[in-house]
Amino acid sequence: MEVRRVQKFGKSTLMVSLPAEWVKEVGLSPGESVYLEVDEDGSLKVYPPNMKLQNATKEVKVLLSNNIMPEIVTRIIYGLYILGFDKIEIESKDKLFNEDILRKVKEAVRSLIGYEITVQNVDYIQIQSFLDPTKYTMTSLLNRLINNLKQMLHYLSLGIKEGSRTFLQETIELEKEVDRLYYLALRQLILSQSNRSLAYMIGVKRIQLIGNRILIKAIEESADEISEAATDLLTLTPQELEEVKNYWNNMFDLIEQSTAIIDHTIKVLAKEDAKLINETMEELRTLRRVLISEATNIENSTSNIKNYRILIAIRTVNLRLYNAIRRMEPIVEIAFNRSLENTKEIVID
């Protein structure tokens, strides 16, 4: 490690000269700008122009046989996307992709933000990433995930109120968008582990990597529950869905409360107020108790329903809401822990 003396420049500026060998190696010229980054441990990093985010392109070749289960193709592409691969070359060992494999490849690529098929032949597919990771901060991704989650609840409520299959289907479509954002957020987190410059630019602290992973998974699982509620309702016939409308008032209150508490949950992430976060945690627990209590009320109010399909659908909506709210609890716990990260003194009034 080289040691250099800090010198005073002017009245208040301190200056350290750059090593001549480093300047020559990166081709730095007088008048050019460099990037400075303060790391979490207090160290300072200096990056020359056009090298701040320079990384080798990650490429991989995948050889497939038509005998494999098509689902494994989806998992491979998702896994490579999450791991930050920029280019995937898929070749058929049998000189021809079968229809199922071709369909799974296309479905997977369409469901991943930034991936596109750039070359396609009967036995070869090239997938390329056109993603600029610096454009997706973790805060913006979390906000988009939560906004989609709240919209899912809104359409679920409308679907019940109007007896509308279209609104229920929209709930499911929004869950697919949540998945796309989830995979992108996961990719960003994994890239941030190896690229601290990117982590700095998108607002990911090293100490918060695991917490962010739990956050996005909690939202994704909550969206799954709401989507399942819509899916359960879509199994009903139009006539059965009309009958469910009779119970919309009770469901509306529960969905509105769920939406409000989800909104509170994500907002406290930006706060460093342990007392406020604790109140939100208690709100979550209270709503869970309400949902459990409402399950008993549903048993009583639906005792006269003879159609077991309607009965199960109504009960399932309540159960799915309960599970969706339960998924939010880790988010509040993480918010509480983060409120203590930089604390020198704790005062509880």
Image (spheres, rainbow, N blue to C red):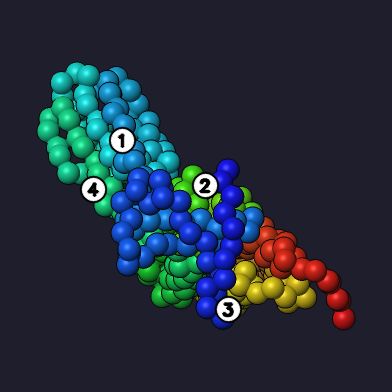
Callout in the foreground (4, 2):
2
How crowded is the residue under tag 4: few (<14 C-alpha within 10 Å), some, or many (20+)? some
Percent coordinates x, y for residue 222 in the rendering? 55, 58
Residue type (three-letter) at the residue carrying disc 3? Ser
- The answer to whether the residues at label 4 and label 2 have Cβ atoms under 8 Å apart is no
Q: Nearer the viewer, residue 198 or 182?
A: 198
Element at badge 3? loop
Return the disc, 1 or 3, that comes first in the chain's sequence: 3
Callout in the foreground (2, 3):
3
Q: Is residue 337 above or below residue 94?
A: below
* Residue at 15% over, 39% down: 119
Task: List the residue tagged with mark 3.
Answer: 12
Element at badge 1? strand
* Residue at 72% over, 75% down: 273
Q: Nearer the viewer, residue 269 or 287?
A: 269
Give the left or right position of residue 74, taking residue 185 as reference.
left
Q: CA distance from mark 2 to mark 1?
A: 19 Å
Task: List the residue tagged with mark 4.
Answer: 116
